[in-house]
Structures are given as C-alpha cells and as structure tokens.
Amino acid sequence: MLGLAGNVGLQGATVIVRGLATGDIQDDNLKSVIRSEVKVGMCHGLIFGMVCGLIILTIAKTLLDSNPMLGLSVGLGIVLAVSMAAFIGSLTPWVFKKLDIDPAISTGPVVTTINDIAGLFIYLMTTSLVFSLI
C-alpha cells in the first residue's frame, strides 16, 4: 500500500515539476492542475482499494485465518493513502517553487518521506477504527 501511494505521489509531483519547468503551469492554472491530479489519484485509490479490499475480504477467513473486516480496512486505507499522496505530490513542487527551492531536486525525497509517514499513519488509524467498530 505504501509503495502504491508513493508512486501516485511521485507521479503527481513529476507532472507538476515538468509543467513548472516548461511554463505550462502558472499560478493562474495551478489549482485546476492540482485538482486534476488529485482526481486521478482518487480514482486510482478507489480502483486499487476496491480490488485489494475485495480480494482480502474474499480470502481473509479461509486462507488468512483472519477477520473479513481486514478487507475493508485495507481497501479504505489504500483509498485514503493514495488520495493523500496525490495531493501531497501535486502540492509540494509548487511550495518549493514559492520558497525559491528547486522543485526538481527537492520534491522526490520530501514527497516519499511524507507519503511513507502519512501512509503508515493512515493505514494504522484506519485499521484501528475499523476493528474498534466490530
């Protein structure tokens, strides 16, 4: 899950960094580009979250000897982590540009670190909340 979120975040960052470098993205169209990247990230999160969640839901009891709610927990965690990663990945290059820091150099490590920490937090909190409802 963390790898998927990281990839989505870095993909969004790459699109923004390229657009900033070529001049295709300016302050006047930045919101729409970030909105578009977040929508794509949310779609990826929904698709992969549903697929993984349903697979785990299906095999949880028989193969994993676990509660089927694990599927809901993993699926929801993927949706939330990937959506968050798309937002962070899209916003970070712009923040660096505003701070006069080269986004091409700085964005990757920062996005990866934030996504790893936030993704793990989201997964653990989602699991904790889902299993506290049982």
Image (spheres, rainbow, N blue to C red):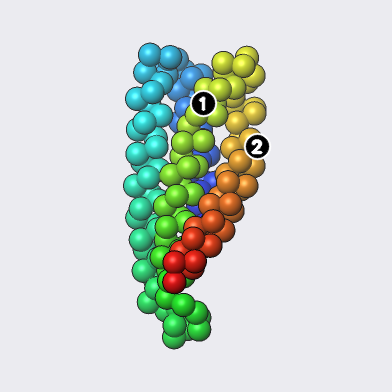
Classify 10 Å Cα crowding around label 1: few (below 14), some (14-19), many (20 and above).
many
Q: Name the residue rendered at 42%, 57% in the picture.
A: 76
58 displayed left or right of 91:
left
Task: Report the residue marked by disc 2.
Answer: 109
Instruction: Tell me if I can see residue 56 in this picture.
Output: no
Q: What residue lies at 50% left-to-right and 29% top-to-bottom?
A: 91
Q: Nearer the viewer, residue 69 or 40?
A: 69
CA gap between label 1 and label 2 equals 14 Å
Residue 5, label in figure = none
Front in this rendered view, residue 7 or 71: 71
Disc 1 or 2, which lies upstream in sequence? 1
Q: Secondary structure at mark 2?
A: helix
Where does residue 61 sit, x and y in percent of width and height? 44, 83
Q: 36 left or right of 101?
A: left
Image height of 1 relative to 67, above or below: above
Residue picked out by circle 1: 17
In this view, the residue farthest toward the front is 133
Q: Residue at x 61, y 41 (%)?
A: 114
Q: Quadrant of residue 83?
A: top left
* Camera-side residue of 9 and 17: 9
Mark 2, Cα crowd under 10 Å, few <14 / some 14-19 / many 20+, is: few
Q: Amino acid at mark 1?
A: Val
* Rendered location of residue 50, percent (x, y): 35, 61
Q: Determine whether 64 is above or below 98 in the image.
A: below
Quadrant holding the C terminus: bottom left
Q: Position of residue 113 (x, y in %)?
A: 64, 42
Left or right of residue 100: residue 78 = left
